[in-house]
Image (cartoon, helix red, strand yellow):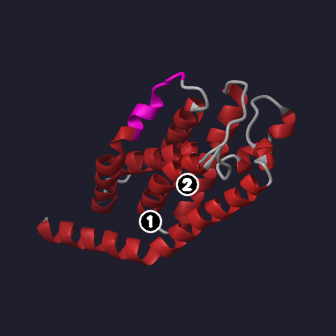
Amino acid sequence: MLDQLTTSLQLVIDSIKLNYPFAIGLILFLWVFNIVNWSTGSRLNILGIIPRNIYSLPGIIFSPILHYDFNHLFFNSIPLFVLANLILIKGKLIFWFVTATVTLISGLAIWLFGRRSIHIGASGLVMGYFGFILSNAYHNASMVAIIAAILGLYYFGGLLLALIPSGEKGVSWEGHIFGFLAGIAAAFLM
C-alpha cells in the first residue's frame, strides 16, 4: 500500500512538472486577451452570456475568457492554474474534454436559467474543474484521483462556499453552481 502511494505521488509530481508550462500558457492567454479587452474599454465583454438573448449564444464559448477587471482575473487565475494541473494528470485529451464539457453545459445552463446580466469570467470553469476532480475520485477511485481530490479540497475547499448564492452584486453564483454541476457531469460522462 505504501509503495502504491509513493508511486502515485511521484506520478502526480512528474505530471505537474511536465504540464505546468501548458497551464501557464493558458493563464497567459487569459491575461493577454484581457489586456487587449481592457485597452478597448472592455468592449469585448458584450461577448459574455446574456441569458435568453439569442445573440449572446456565442457568449457560451467566450464568457470564460472574459473578466471584469484585473482583480477578477487574478482571483480566477490561481485556482484555474492549480486545478488545471490536477486535471492534466489524466492527460491533455481529458483536460480538453472536461474544459469543453464544463464550458458548454454551464454556459448553456446560465443562458437558459441565469439572471438578466452579462455573465463573464472563468469562475464557472474553476468550479467545473473542482467538481470534476472531486467527482472523478468517486467514479474512478484510483490512488492518483484520490490524491488529486485531497489536494483540491485542501487548497480550495473554500470554493464549496461559492455554491451558496450570496446576492453579491456582480457575482454570477449561477456560473459557480452550473460550473460545479457540469464538472460532475464531465466525470460521469467520462
The percent position of residue 129, horizontal first and vertical second, equals 49, 50
Q: Amino acid at mark 2?
A: Val
**Label 2 Cα neighbours within 10 Å, binned few <14 / some 14-19 / many ≥20:** many
State whether residue 76 is above or below residue 82: above
Seen as rendered, the residue at the extreme top is 167
Whether residue 190 is visible: no
When asked about the image quadrant of residue 89, the answer is bottom left
Q: Residue at x 49, y 43 (%)?
A: 127
Seen as rendered, the residue at the extreme right is 55
Judge by depth and name the residue closer to the eye, 103 or 4: 103
Q: Which residue is mark 2?
A: 98
Label disc, if present, on residue 90 of the rendered structure: 1
State whether residue 171 is above or below residue 182: above
Q: Residue at x 69, y 46 (%)?
A: 63
Q: Amino acid at mark 1?
A: Lys
Disc 2 on helix, strand or loop? Answer: helix
